[in-house]
Amino acid sequence: MALSQALSACDSMPSSTATVSVDSGTFIDKSGDTITIGGKSTRWWTERYGSPLHITYAPAISANIEAFKSVFDRYYPRGEVRYATKAESHPAVMRKVLQTGAGADVASPFELRSALDSGFHPESLHINGNAKTDDLIDAAIEKDILIVADSVDELDVIASRTQRKRPRVLLRLSGFNLGNVTSTSLSTAGAWTKFGIAVDQVPDVLNRLSSYPVEVLGFHTHIGSQTIAVAAYATVLGKMLEFGRKLKQLGHSFEIINIGGGFPCSYGTEVEWNTVLERIREGHRAAMNGDLSKVFMWENKLGGFSVDAAGQPREWVGEVFYAPFPKEQIVERLLAGNVTVDGQNLGTVEALRAAGEPRLIIEPGRAVIGEAGVTLAKIEFLKTLSNGHNLVSTDLNSQLFREGRARLLSSLWNFTEDIRRKDATNFQAFVAGNLCFWDDILSDAKIEFSRRPRRGEIMMISATGAYSANVAASTANSFPRPNRLLIEDSGEVVEIKRADSYEQIYSL
């Protein structure tokens, strides 16, 4: 945000009553010399709403949900999409999700309120989380909202708070031995996770269910974000079907399986991703031999690589940014494939039908809204470090930009003006934020620009619709949190969050 804007609070921002419309037919257009968003130049957007700026495109949200629903239509009509609200929970976004007929997974009192205020019926919601408050549990019981019990202790608390109603409950499971299916920092169904009831404890819990005044209808798990292995989903689904058999044998209903989300986005091509991995390896090897010019990762770190005894990169165990079967395609592969239930290999749909056709719920979040958003940022300064590497400083910062997958792939960083011009050699640089903190680096890997950046020009970072704008967004160094906009299907631009004013930053 410019100093003149900061000193004059919100005077430079458009009135909340003014209706602004753009062309909703195309979100991003790169066909000319200038990138346009909704038919408007990025300069138009930043002059009107400031920089940095988050923009989300509502039609893409609808299209992504419809893609998941179409898979269920073809393979298993008992499937149900429930949007993972944590990805972006603003009521304007929730209303768009509601229009598609999807439900929602909520994990806090305000996420629940946003869903209800947006018009969601309680039947289409479920409440998740490992540390639910008594008030949240009470609200779920009162409104007959499905509760995902995260622990045996929580199940006891739910049972103790029942009065006239029998709460509807799923048991969240973890402790699966799935191997390296996503980054350990994103894994939520293995041994080292704060979520869920360990699978080896489940038989005992099931045997005790008759003593609980609750209605356990099935099971839930969430493997973790960016899970690219279909086999991992098949493993957890097969195990939940086994527990479903046990549930029915004990005289209970088995009505719901929720396999969570984590369906991967593919942020680049396979070639681009493999090139990134090789450049990390090559840069590290060269640096170990005294050549720092080929370093590809900030501080010559290895990112998600494991290392051998000599400290050399071995295999990538971190988050993967290329997926052979992204988003709804991995659900299709699961339903078209096989699962193992009590040692018997069955077609997935066949196994679900044999179990009585329970509802199969999924919780896509990033897969719904991640690629529906972009972030605009202004280039402030360039410099060359003492080690010879280039650094581009922007008006964005790491507290406003948490979309780590954009930190490794150059294709997600775009100039928005004079985009056809290229220098004789590409300009490689790390990208930094504007905070007075040493670790405010936006790109862990070198970004390869087609030319040398110019001070004052606007960059567009793609696929930032999930989490970036709302998770960990803070006013560090008293920089205001930026405007967040939603382009509706009609073309109307909705301000879903205004940039902080001086008074708001320092208010009680």
Image: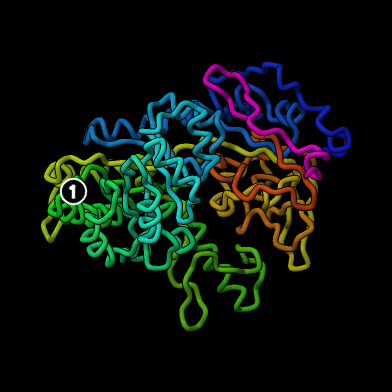
Q: Quadrant of residue 74?
A: top left
Please check the rendered image and state whether residue 492 is part of the magenta-colored stretch, yes or no: yes
Residue at image position (29%, 49%) is: 213
Q: Nearer the viewer, residue 336 or 380?
A: 336
The residue to which callout 1 is attached is: 252
Q: Which residues are magenta?
A: 485-508
Displayed quadrant of residue 333: top left
Image quadrant for the C terminus? top right
Q: Is residue 376 left or right of residue 309?
A: right
Q: Is residue 10 visible?
A: yes
Q: Quadrant of the N terminus?
A: top right
Classify 487 as above or below 212.
Answer: above
Amino acid marked by disc 1: His
Q: Position of residue 169 (x, y in %)?
A: 32, 47
Residue drawn 18% across the image and 48% down it: 252
Residue 461: % across, % down: 61, 42
- How many residues crowd mark 1 within 10 Å: few (<14), some (14–19), many (20+)? some
Residue 127: image x %, image y %?
42, 44
Q: Nearer the viewer, residue 152 or 223?
A: 152
| Element type at mark 1 | loop
Q: Position of residue 222 (x, y in %)?
A: 37, 52
User: Is 165 displayed left or right of 287 in the figure?
Assistant: left
